[in-house]
Image (cartoon, rainbow, N blue to C red):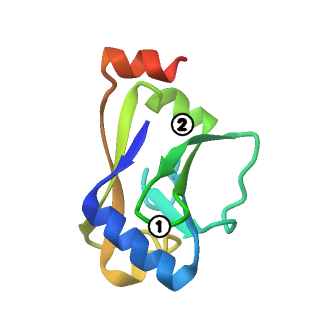
Amino acid sequence: MVDVTDAASGLLRDLTERNGPVMFHQSGGCCDGSAPMCYPDGDFLLGDADVHLGDLDIGLARPVPVWMSKSQYEYWSHTHLTIDVVKGRGAGFSLEAPYGVRFLIRSRLLTDEEVVARDR
């Protein structure tokens, strides 16, 4: 399960206006630790080793898809993830990097109800 804060939604709308549709891939530890990386949609090549976590509704015609590698998903599958944005330098590959902010993941354990919904 994945969600987005209001602050991150605002930044995503700005990035979409500048770059066209965007997508996230949750980094597996390279470059910027384990950060959600924002790319123009299609710039990050997805494959059978990636899991679609969901889509973020940011108030535009097209939601923002969020992906993670299967191997990393095994560690995170019991958590609810929220994409947020904070001041600071992020990875050079993610679209927000030039703006003095970076996306990050906040997580919490899934509730019993969320586990049931996920497993349906």
- Mark 1 element type: loop
Residue drawn at x 52%, y 58% as measured from the top left: 63
- Is residue 90 found left or right of 51 in the rendered image? left
- How busy is the neighbourhood of tag 1: few (under 14 within 10 Å), some, or many (20 plus)? few
Give the Cα separation between the discs numbered 2 and 1.
29 Å
**Residue 18: x %, y % from top left:** 50, 85
Q: What amino acid is found at the position of numbered circle 1 in the picture?
A: Leu
Give how far across and how far down residue 74 sits, in percent.
53, 27
- Amino acid type, residue under disc 2 in the picture: Gln
51 up-or-down from 65: above or below: above
In front: label 2 or label 1: 1
> Badge 2, how many Cα within 10 Å: few under 14, some, many 20+?
some
The image position of residue 90, as x and y in percent, is: 38, 69
Say left or right for 4 vs 44: left
Image vertical order of residue 13 relative to residue 68, above or below? below
**Residue in the image at 40% along x and 79% along y:** 14
Task: Classify residue 97 by image quadrant.
Answer: bottom left
Please indicate whether residue 13 sits to the left or right of residue 66 in the image.
Answer: left
**What residue did someone put label 1 on?**
60
Circle 2: element type: helix
**Which residue is at 49% across, 61% downward?**
37
Query: In this rendering, does residue 102 appear at all?
Result: no
Quarter occupied by the N terminus:
top left
Q: Which residue is mark 2?
A: 72
Quadrant location of the C terminus in the rendered image: top right
Kindly check if marks 2 and 1 are in contact, taking CB atoms under 8 A apart as contact.
no
- In this rendered view, identify the residue nearer to me: 81 or 116: 116
Q: Position of residue 20 (x, y in %)?
A: 58, 77
Relative to 34, say whether 70 is above or below.
above
18 relative to 83 in the view: left or right: right
